[in-house]
Amino acid sequence: MCVKIVSKTMESFRKIKQFETSRQKREGGGFMVRRPIGDKIDQCDPFLMLDHLGPVVYGPGEAVGAPDHPHRGFETVTYIIHGENTHQDSAGNSGILGPGWVQWMTAGSGVVHSEMPSERFRKAGGLFEGFQLWVNLPAKDKMVKPRYQDTPPEKIPVIQLPDGVGTMKIIAGQYLGTKAYIETRTPITYLDVHIKAGKRLDAEIPQGQNCFIYVWNGSGHLGSEGKKAKMGDVALLDENGKSFTMSASDEEDMKVMIAAGVPINEPIARYGPFVMNTQEQIYQAFADYQNGKLGKIKGSEERYEITKKAVAQQKKTGKYYNQ
């Protein structure tokens, strides 16, 4: 397949500014992630981090999550592909996210929350895969009241792309006139795109938005440069152009996440679970957390014990830990 794009409108295509292969690492209670943004590529304003969780197949008792931890000053976007995740927070919110669910959590002034595999999934095991995107908040919104948008798959628009290219799930923003159900505090485009084998997509990228493309399944080529890409590869795009071209290989489909957003262009001070504008605000966030101002969730000891047992079970089977 010829992937080099030759067109009279070449100037309309964005170019790849940085291309990296994300490395796997262990996070939270011991789950495996690839981190295309927040590691080799530090950030893509307003996006602070993207974690690709899994894919892993857990045996009974092996599934792990992220027990109680705080956040302040930004938003977390959790998108489940396979498996189940239970969330709870210090404001009394709770729920179970299954395949296709999206949770857009505005941490704002701060919450303590827990993200754990559901009891059913923990006991039975199975395939787990998902994403968590961290989105920065502007200074004026960093201390807003926390908010959750737990969105089931039936409320997330899925469109058929022209010419049988594939499908697109519109998590945030809009595409070809179809708008997302989820509301965002700043203009953001977040799309899960499935391109069929041998097909090409010239994806529209909103002008004025920074953008990255992450290949999370399959393989193909990215950009008018025809850069070969496979699962785990990420392309940070330049700021010029109205679209970006990508194509799946002839042998298999390619699935990509497209994330674009209007940059906030403000100073960033961050440490662990807190993202603010100044170091003094970080100190205050830690003080507020340690003084209990972000609250607590009942049952934290039990969740930590469940996590310890799951890690021990993984080590016993040797499936996800180097021996």
Image: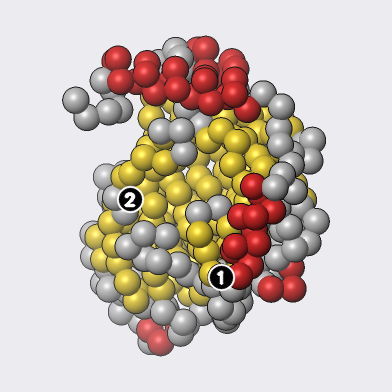
Q: Which one is in front, 299 or 205?
A: 299
Decide: is 236 above or below 301.
below
| Quadrant assignment, res 53 | top left
- Looking at the image, tell me whether mark 1 or mark 2 is earlier in sequence order: 2
**SS for callout 1:** helix
Q: Which one is in front, 212 or 11?
A: 212
* Residue depicted at x 61% and y 55%: 286
* Residue depicted at x 42% and y 41%: 27
Which numbered tag is attached to residue 232? Answer: 2
Crowdedness of circle 1 by 10 Å Cα count: few (<14), some, many (20+)?
A: some
Crowdedness of circle 2 by 10 Å Cα count: few (<14), some, many (20+)?
A: many
Which numbered tag is attached to residue 48? Answer: none
Decide: is 217 above or below 180.
above
Q: Indicate the position of residue 231 as horizontal and vertical percent values.
A: 32, 48
Q: Report the colour scheme.
A: secondary structure
Query: Which image quadrant: the N terminus?
Result: bottom left
**321 left or right of 64?**
left
Q: Indicate the position of residue 29 as horizontal and vertical percent values.
A: 46, 33
* Residue depicted at x 41% and y 33%: 30
Q: Which residue is mark 1?
A: 279
Residue type pointed to by label 1: Gln
Query: Which image quadrant: the C terminus?
Result: top left
Cα separation between marks 1 and 2: 33 Å
Residue 93 shows in the view: yes
Residue type pointed to by label 2: Gly
Q: Indicate the position of residue 147 as horizontal and vertical percent values.
A: 77, 51
